Image (cartoon, rainbow, N blue to C red):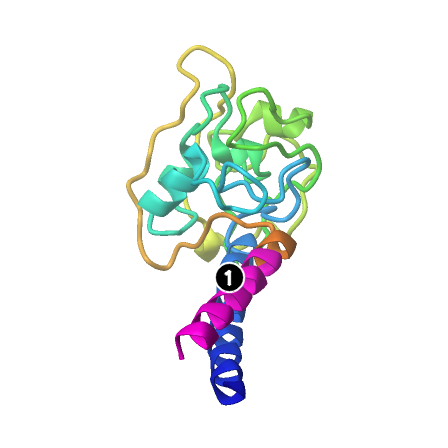
Amino acid sequence: MVRSVVVALAVALTVAPSTVQGYAKYVKLVPNGGNVPDNSNIGHLDPAGETGLSDFGKAFSTAGNAWTAALCQADTDGDGFTNGQELGDPCCTWTTSSTAGLVADGVSDPSDATKTPTSSELKAGCSSSGTSTSANFTGSGDSVGDVVGTVSPAGPTIGGMPPDDDEDDSSESAVLTAGASMTTISSVAIGVATAVVLAVVL
């Protein structure tokens, strides 16, 4: 009996951490992934990530779990601002290796139409030259090789959605996050439940 419990716990503890690591990686794949006010899990409907994907999470999944020009230029919550504007990447230039053009202040939740960017820079969108309409951005801004796509000025205006450049390739990166602490608790609970079931069965 003791041997069965030890084996069951070993299996459960091996499986549980991989679940936590799987969610935490998404924070790094989206601009300001861990910096969205009031939502540490923009890809899911709840902080623990247990009740399904949000509209942004579905779009991220459809984009191959990558921050693509199409995902950046989309408006998944229908509030008139692109996902790029809401996440601080108005010109769709952010990559995991370059923060060029990234705006950290005033970001909003691309899954909640009641929350929009508070920064005037993000509200203004991107100029036709592919640069932020304000000079107050973080990053070097000189890395042409890291550009994901160029967008036109956008926002809650008539015809506000910029065109898609159709460059959806595997070198682009992105998406969502999950509440790591809740995921840890959920994973441990699942691991313990699995261990108990295996101990009873064995």
Q: Report if residue 21 is visible in the image.
A: no
Decide which of 147, 36 is in the foreground and name it. 36
Count of picture labels: 1
| Image spot of residue 94 (x, y percent) | 52, 49
10 Å neighbourhood of mark 1: few (<14), some, or many (≥20)? some
Task: Look at the magenta stretch and give its main secondary structure.
Answer: helix
Residue at image location 37% in from the left, 59% down from the top:
171
Residue occupying the point 68% across, 47% down? 138
In the rendered structure, which amino acid carries the disc numbered 1? Ile
Is 24 one of the magenta-colored residues?
no
| Rendering quarter of residue 160 | top left
In the picture, the quarter occupied by the C terminus is bottom left
Q: Is residue 152 left or right of residue 107?
A: left
Residue nearer the viewer, 14 or 71: 14
Magenta residues?
184-202
At horizontal 57% and vertical 44% (from top left) the residue drawn is: 41
- Relative to 1, residue 65 above or below: above
Using the rendered image of the protein, determine whether residue 116 is visible from the camera's viewpoint: yes
> Horizontal placement of 52 versus 64: left or right?
right
Q: Please state the horizontal and vertical placement of residue 32, each as a whole percent of the image.
A: 61, 46
Q: Position of residue 177 (x, y in %)?
A: 54, 50
Q: In the visual, does 35 lie left or right of 126?
A: right
Specify the farthest residue to the top.
Answer: 158
In depth, the one of 14 and 25 nearer the eye is: 14
Return the x and y of residue 191 as percentages of the image width and height. 52, 67
Specify whether residue 196 is painted magenta: yes
SS type, badge 1: helix
Hey, which residue is sitting farthest bottom in the picture? 3
Q: Return the residue nearer the eye: 201 or 186.
A: 201
What residue sits right under mark 1 in the picture?
190
- Whether 57 is drawn above or below 27: the answer is above
